[in-house]
């Protein structure tokens, strides 16, 4: 079993502090990436909501056109 000297422990502490500093830097990078992802998500959500409105408008127009065709067919059958 190796006995740690004061110098060894001091070296270990410097390495640990260096590791902690690296991890803290990486956490800041990850936080920035998460904020960016939320921003992208908000833009995507808005785009999807607009697409949903456009699809609804298209569905409504198709329903109106079907009603027109049904009425026209009735008029033709009565003629």
Image (cartoon, rainbow, N blue to C red):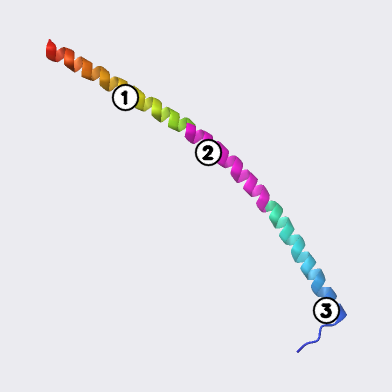
- Between 12 and 75, the residue placed more toward the observer is 75
- Between 12 and 60, the residue placed more toward the observer is 60
Residue 70 location, quadrant: top left
Q: What residue sits right under mark 1 in the picture?
A: 62
Q: Position of residue 15 (x, y in %)?
A: 78, 70
- Local packing at callout 2 (Cα closer than 10 Å; few below 14, some 14-19, many 20+) is few
3D distance between C-alphas at marks 2 and 3: 53 Å
- Residue at point 56% right, 36% down? 43
- Local packing at callout 3 (Cα closer than 10 Å; few below 14, some 14-19, many 20+) is few
Q: Position of residue 14 (x, y in %)?
A: 82, 69
* Drawn side of residue 54 relative to residue 69, left or right: right
- Residue at point 79% right, 66% down? 17
**Residue 45 located within the stretch drawn in magenta:** yes
Residue 69 location, quadrant: top left
What SS does tag 1 mark? helix
Q: Which residues are magenta?
A: 30-49
Q: Position of residue 51 (x, y in %)?
A: 45, 32
Mark drawn on residue 44: 2
* Drawn side of residue 30 relative to residue 47, left or right: right
Q: Earlier in the sequence, mark 3 or mark 1?
A: 3
* Drawn side of residue 42 relative to residue 1, left or right: left
- Residue at point 35% right, 24% down? 60
Q: What residue sits right under mark 3 in the picture?
A: 8
Mostly what secondary structure, the magenta segment? helix
Q: Position of residue 54 (x, y in %)?
A: 43, 28
Q: Which residue reaches farthest right? A: 6
Q: Earlier in the sequence, mark 1 or mark 2?
A: 2
Mark drawn on residue 36: none
What SS does tag 3 mark? helix
């Amino acid at each position: 079993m190796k006995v740690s000297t004061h110098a060894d422990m001091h070296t270990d502490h410097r390495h640990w502090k260096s590791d902690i500093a690296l991890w803290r830097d990486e956490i800041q990078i990850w936080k920035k990436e998460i904020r960016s992802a939320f921003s992208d998500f908000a833009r995507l959500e808005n785009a999807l909501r607009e697409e949903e409105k456009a699809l609804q408008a298209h569905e409504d127009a198709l329903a109106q056109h079907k009603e027109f065709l049904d009425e026209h067919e009735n008029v033709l059958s009565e003629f």
